[in-house]
Image (cartoon, helix red, strand yellow):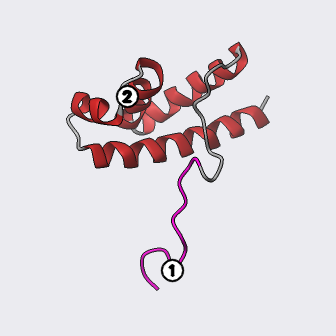
Amino acid sequence: MRHGGGLGKVSANEAGFDVAAVEMGDAELLLLNVALDALAVMDARKAELVKLQYFVGLTVEESAAALGITARTARRDWVLARTWLFNEIVRLRAGR
């Protein structure tokens, strides 16, 4: 089979991978910072996109324009970055 083997598409939000939170404690913000630094080493554009959308508050379209990419690419990168950050934060919490 091709294209996911007949599996349905699920968004990161539907799967419960919501890294962004309105209020975070200092410890959680520190974990996010460490995870974001690791993401920047792996993929600087995705890390910058997270900063623009999460910390600066830009929309997908505004972030895409700032980075010189399409809105579609920005949306795809946003989902991938948030999912990666969620998994990295879970890993970091386990290592405490």
The amino acid at mark 2 is Glu
Left or right: residue 80 compared with residue 16 = left
Q: What stretch is highlighted in magenta?
A: 1-13
Q: Earlier in the sequence, mark 2 or mark 1?
A: 1
The secondary structure type at the circle numbered 2 is helix
The amino acid at mark 1 is Gly
**Number of residues whose C-alpha sits closer than 10 Å to that of mark 2, classed few (under 14), some (14–19) or many (20 or more):** some
Question: In the image, residue 65 lies at what x, y percent?
Answer: 22, 32
The secondary structure type at the circle numbered 1 is loop
Asked where in the image residue 35 lies, by quadrant, the reply is top right
Question: In the image, residue 5 lies at what x, y percent?
Answer: 51, 80
Left or right: residue 32 compared with residue 61 = right
| Residue 5, numbered circle | 1
The secondary structure that most of the magenta stretch takes on is loop
Residue beneath disc 2: 48
Q: Residue at x 31, y 30 (%)?
A: 63
Left or right: residue 21 compared with residue 27 = left
Asked where in the image residue 75 lies, by quadrant, the reply is top left
Mark 2 → mark 1, Cα distance in angstroms: 32 Å
Instruction: Determine if the magenta segment contains residue 8.
Output: yes
Left or right: residue 78 compared with residue 11 = left
- Residue 5 vertical position relative to residue 68 in the rendered view, above or below: below
Taking depth in this image into account, of 5 and 37 the one nearest to the observer is 5
